[in-house]
Image: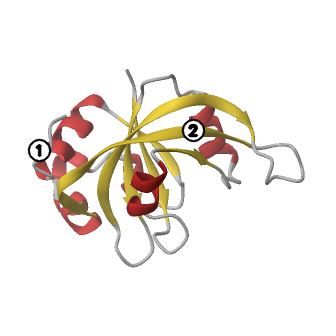
């Protein structure tokens, strides 16, 4: 199993929206590197659900439920999407400030490539963020 972090603007698609939907399309990604990250996902991979913009915090965990396929919202036909299933919220959201303050997370793609909406998370980074959020890994 691989781990990822997926960013969403809570005003557009929030953790609560994801929970209500259960399984939902993760569409609208228009960056080649983020798109390639989604192409690399496997069924059952786990992803942190990250609220971007003002909140800037990991709020939940989702699971890849459908592999990469064409995104009908992309008129160019170049980008795709995956479906994710809400698993559970973080017991305590983990903020970007907390992540940046933790030296063991200095190589986390969220810190190094802050503009990407879908980034990989190493096994040890996943375990540490889960521990910070008081949530089982």
42 sits to left or right of 80:
left
Quarter of the image for the C terminus: give it: top left
Question: In the image, what residue occupies the spot 57% across and 27% down?
Answer: 40
> Among all residues in the image, which is located at the extreme right?
76
Tag of residue 44: none
Please tell me how crowded label 2 is: few (under 14), some (14-19), or many (20+) other residues with Cα within 10 Å: some
Quarter of the image for the N terminus: give it: top left
Question: Which residue is under mark 2?
Answer: 83
Q: Nearer the viewer, residue 106 or 32?
A: 32
Question: Which residue is under mark 1?
Answer: 131
Q: Quadrant of residue 121?
A: top left
Q: Position of residue 35 (x, y in %)?
A: 65, 42
Q: Position of residue 28 (x, y in %)?
A: 68, 55
Q: Nearer the viewer, residue 17 or 116?
A: 17
Residue 113 visible in the current orientation: no
Q: Quadrant of residue 38?
A: top right
Q: Nearer the viewer, residue 19 or 10?
A: 19
């Amino acid at each position: 199993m691989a781990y990822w972090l997926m960013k969403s603007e809570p005003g557009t698609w929030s953790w609560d929206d994801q929970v209500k939907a259960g399984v939902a399309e993760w569409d609208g990604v228009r960056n080649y590197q983020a798109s390639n990250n989604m192409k690399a996902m496997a069924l059952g991979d786990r992803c942190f659900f990250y609220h971007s913009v003002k909140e800037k915090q990991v709020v939940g965990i989702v699971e890849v439920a459908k592999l990469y396929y064409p995104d009908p919202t992309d008129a160019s036909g170049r980008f795709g999407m995956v479906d994710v299933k809400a698993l559970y919220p973080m017991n305590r959201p983990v903020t970007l400030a907390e992540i940046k303050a933790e030296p063991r997370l200095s190589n986390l793609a969220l810190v190094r490539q802050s503009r990407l909406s879908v980034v990989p998370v190493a096994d040890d980074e996943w375990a540490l963020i889960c521990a910070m959020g008081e949530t089982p890994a």
